[in-house]
């Protein structure tokens, strides 16, 4: 399905050029541009080794974009070389949107988070899907090895400014908003997928089908 046509006609002063953007935002310091690396140095390796959560952005030629979360104990993303990392695929909802996109368009971008760390690490590259048994066995948790991994050839990597983490109080539990009124996943599924069950019954269905297993 092609991307839907967006109508922004009700908004004025839309920015349509680099020149307009720079007039408002200014230009980055030369050092900010120069911080991009084409390979992982030791500081980047250390950051990835400490990360327990990342987001993977992917796209396909049809115009669909996707951002998918990945999380595991720190060190779950393996650095195989200065220009190659591997991210294991754990049991999920079986949509595998990232993999389907990569089959059509290998370009991906990843942002790594370390709980309590204000900076993040951004990476861009080209990806492939691997079922290599030696690679996957080295990513096992207990007796559970992933069935697939995402190999990413690193093209650019750089540390990202901490201001957004600071402003959001992301790692400050005392500042977190009350989210108790928000619907959980089961309630959303029943509503959005028009499932003729209560959220509680749907949860039991998922549990019986083994869809809630972590590994």
Image: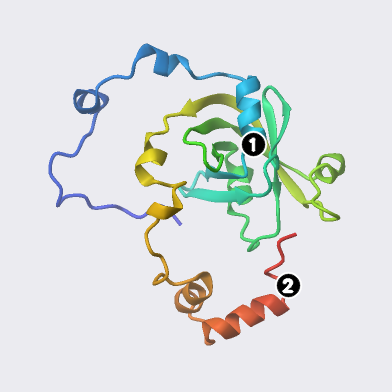
Between circles 1 and 2, the one closer to the viewer is 1
Q: Residue at x 75, y 59 (%)?
A: 215
For label 1, the SS is helix
- 3 w.r.t. 189: above or below: above
**Nearer the observer, 215 or 3:** 215
Extreme residue toward the front, this view: 174
Q: Choose between 148 and 166: the one closer to the eye.
A: 166
Quick check: 52 above or below 211? Answer: above
Residue 139 x/y as whole percent: 79, 44
| Residue 156 visible in this rendered orientation of the protein | yes
Which of the 4 image quarters holds residue 183? Answer: bottom left
User: x, y percentage for residue 129?
Assistant: 71, 43
- Which numbered dot is residue 50? 1
Q: Is residue 40 visible?
A: no
Point 62% across, 20% down: residue: 39
Residue at 18% of width from left, 39% of height from top? 14
Res. 124 image quadrant: top right
Task: State which tag comes first along the sequence, 1 or 2.
Answer: 1
Do tag 1 and tag 2 residues touch (Cβ < 8 Å)?
no
Q: Compute the Cα span from label 1 to label 2.
A: 30 Å
Q: Residue at x 51, y 74 (%)?
A: 189
**x, y (%) of residue 3?**
39, 52
Asked which secondary structure carries label 2, the reply is loop
Q: Quadrant of residue 167?
A: top left
Residue 130 x, y percent position in the rendering = 75, 42
Which disc, if any, is residue 210?
2
Q: Along the horizontal axis of the image, is 10 left or right of 152?
A: left
């Amino acid at each position: 399905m092609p991307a839907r046509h967006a109508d922004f006609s009700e908004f004025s002063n839309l920015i349509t050029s680099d020149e307009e953007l720079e007039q408002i935002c200014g230009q980055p310091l030369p050092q900010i541009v120069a911080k991009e690396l084409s390979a992982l140095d030791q500081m980047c390796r250390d950051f990835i080794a400490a990360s327990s959560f990342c987001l993977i952005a992917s796209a396909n030629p049809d115009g669909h974009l996707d951002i998918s979360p990945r999380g595991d104990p720190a060190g779950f993303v393996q650095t195989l070389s200065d220009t190659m990392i591997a991210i294991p695929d754990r049991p999920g909802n079986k949509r595998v949107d990232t993999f389907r996109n990569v089959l059509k368009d290998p370009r991906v971008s990843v942002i790594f988070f370390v709980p309590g760390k204000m900076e993040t690490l951004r990476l861009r590259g080209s990806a492939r899907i691997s079922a290599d048994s030696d690679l996957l066995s080295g990513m096992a948790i207990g007796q559970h090895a992933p069935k697939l991994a995402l190999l990413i050839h690193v093209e650019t990597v750089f540390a990202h400014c901490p201001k957004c983490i600071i402003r959001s109080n992301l790692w400050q539990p005392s500042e977190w908003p009350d989210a108790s009124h928000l619907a959980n996943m089961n309630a959303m599924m029943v509503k959005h997928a028009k499932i003729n069950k209560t959220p509680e019954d749907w949860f039991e269905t998922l549990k019986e089908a083994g869809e809630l297993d972590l590994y």
